[in-house]
Amino acid sequence: MDTAVAAVVRATGASGALLYILTPDREALWLSHVSGVPREVAAPWSRVAPGDPMPVADAVREERLVWVSGQVEMARRYPRPAVVLPYDFALAAVPVASDSGVRGGLVLFWPSGHPPQLSRVEHDALRAGSRRLGHLIEQAARRGEPVVSPGRPRVLPPEPGRTPTAEEAWAGTALLDRLPGGYVGLNLNGRITLVTPAAAELVDAAPERLLGSLPWEALPWMDVPHVEDRYRAALISRTPQTFRVLRPPDTWLSFELYPDPSGISVRIDRAADGREPDPLSETAHGPGRATVLYHLMHLATTLTEAVGVQDVVDQTAQQLLPALGAQGMVLMTSEDGRLRILGHRGYSTELLGRFDGAPLSRDIPGAAVLATGEAGFFPSFRQMVAAYPKMTHEDGMAAWAVLPLIASSRPIGSVLLSYDRPRAFPPSERAVLTSLAGLVGQALDRARLYDSKDRLAHRLQSALLPHGLPSVPGLRVVARYLPAARGLGIGGDFYDLIRLDEKTVAAAIGDVQGHNVDAAALMGQVRTAVHAHATVGAPPDHVLGGTNRLLTDLDPGLFTSCLYAHLNLGRGRACLATAGHPPPLIRHSDGRTELLDIPPGLLLGIDPTARYPSLECALPPGCVLVFYTDGLVEAPGVDPDDATAALAGLVEHSDPDDLEAMADTLVRHAPAPGDDIALLLLSPTPGGG
């Protein structure tokens, strides 16, 4: 396996490779072999799920070649790995297959400057190498040999170079000593393999202390984010890198990194001036890369929990602006050929109101990026107006980045970030910004889908509930319905008020098990059945019995609770029956509040022969009947009896003359918004007969 991986790297001219093995249950791809980079660089992707948005996962799942030509394309298509490795390199991923099917995946990467397409030689070598690896994996599986040790991939050594003679080694050492500055050699793992006396003197450390160590571990003052970042950039992109570091107390040193397949040569010298001017080591007026990565990781985590567009806007603003040192943000999308502002920070609503709803035009940066999918970076307004001549400088900012929000390989929106000081936007920062926009784009796509489903669900819920309750002389009625917490879908709570004649009305409240379309549909059937039985004048026990027989015949697989009452306003009497529903409260005219002890009946839809005994009670003017569903009193860790007693206390201390205020008080003090809440308050008035 080692030889086969090394051979495909050599044949394709790649700078490194990652070999993944598909587990027998096809639930994971484990990293087996690493070539060309340290194990630590590949560690974030030691295990990849076949459904992950990663090149190797796409290659294995779709059984095709995945080609990423460079940094910009990586940031657009695969923002998660691009955020961690914002460097310029090309990548190819292919499935590793044998005659019996896909066995894993192979990733090869090339340094910066690779042509935009694979050559025929590279393509053929890649295909032959993956076939060879597939057969080797299959043979190992047949022999029962483990091919991969999860979490501990094999790291292949670099191809051996020419071994110098003793005379050449001496001459090379003398040559380095004669050159100005100091020189250090690093292997591919970043450890020091050679240090000249001049280099040791410049960094003020003994050579024996440096050899075999990582520079940022041996020298605490080098433990700053941009040092390791530039080392990784040199390693991955194989292009020279420079940075400067302050050696305490006041000595600035310059470092030049020159990479090749065997390691990195470093030249060290005193900086020409006494100040650090390099934008790579001091991001223009912004936080360091470690801070940026912390915020990006936090953003990625919080975006996975965002369930609506407003959540995405809020999380993006809260995480992006401090991470990137930006002062303004505008999140945009298109709708019916017009630009829509989804959210913003750092801008006035009046200013953005002029753009919200404007026709899509290439003269507006956010709209142009929506059309092209290409990011725009403008270090000054002069460069902004060069690209968009019709733009006027209204926001008072000094630099801008306009980024596409990509989902499913297409732009679905754009985000504008603005800064109050000029900004250089070096290549590494552009890659981070583009990758970041990809994360936001994927979250926005999910959020828009959620919002669409949420609107549809609540439209269905509203259609199944009564649009308005009938006006009944002699009876005051107030109803409330609160859907469950976001993300739980729609539910089956319902209420109804049915006018039977001049002096009699029927009231019903119920709860269908579940929070989905099935529950809502059954709720509509239950409400219709109750309404049908009620309008023919059936008493409460018959109404529930007939509805129960209908549900058992339908056999929906869901159970329903229901409380039904006849209210005779002329006689001042009520007759109630229940099918497993929480008992109602009655507040007497003197303020005393109690539970009505109705004989219990079985939930609807279980036993077609179930009976539903009824209870008759007085219903004098000034009393208040309180019908509610269990969402008002039940929550994890809350005793239902305690919650019901607390509800009774709220009813008792509420003003019976203001049912609206009473209803608001009751729903506001619900234990938790984890379930639907339906509430029906009924109060006879004097002269109701």
Image: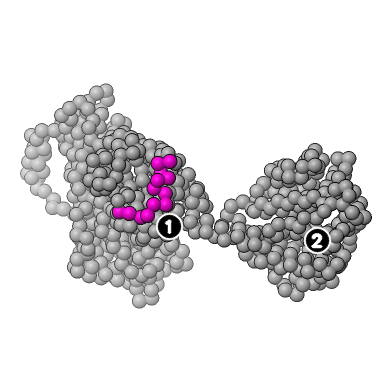
- Colouring scheme applied when the structure was drawn: one colour
Position of residue 686 in the picture relative to residue 464 (left or right): right
Tell me the mark number nearer the camera, choosing from 1 and 2: 2
The chief SS type of the magenta part is: loop
* Label 1 residue SS: strand
Residue that extends furthest to the bottom in the rendered view of this protein = 99
- Amino acid type shown at disc 1: Glu
In front of the other: 52 or 28: 52
Residue at image mark 1: 335
Above or below, 404 against 423 in this view is below
Q: Position of residue 424 (x, y in %)?
A: 25, 39
User: Mark 2 and mark 1 in contact (Cβ < 8 Å)?
Assistant: no
Residue at image mark 2: 499
Q: Is residue 656 visible?
A: yes
Residue visible at 82% across and 49% down in the picture: 683
Q: Position of residue 421 (x, y in %)?
A: 30, 34
Above or below, 395 against 637 in this view is above
Disc sitting over residue 251 in the figure: none
Which quadrant holds the N terminus? Answer: bottom left
Residue 503 picture quarter:
bottom right
Q: Position of residue 584 (x, y in %)?
A: 82, 52
Could you classify mark 1 by the number of other residues whose Cα lies within 10 Å: few (under 14), some (14-19), or many (20 or more)? few
Which region shows up in magenta? 350-362
Above or below, 5 against 554 in this view is above
Residue 320 picture quarter:
top left
- Amino acid type shown at disc 2: Arg
Position of residue 620 in the picture relative to residue 61 (left or right): right
Residue visible at 11% across and 48% down in the picture: 164
Residue that extends furthest to the top in the rendered view of this protein = 249
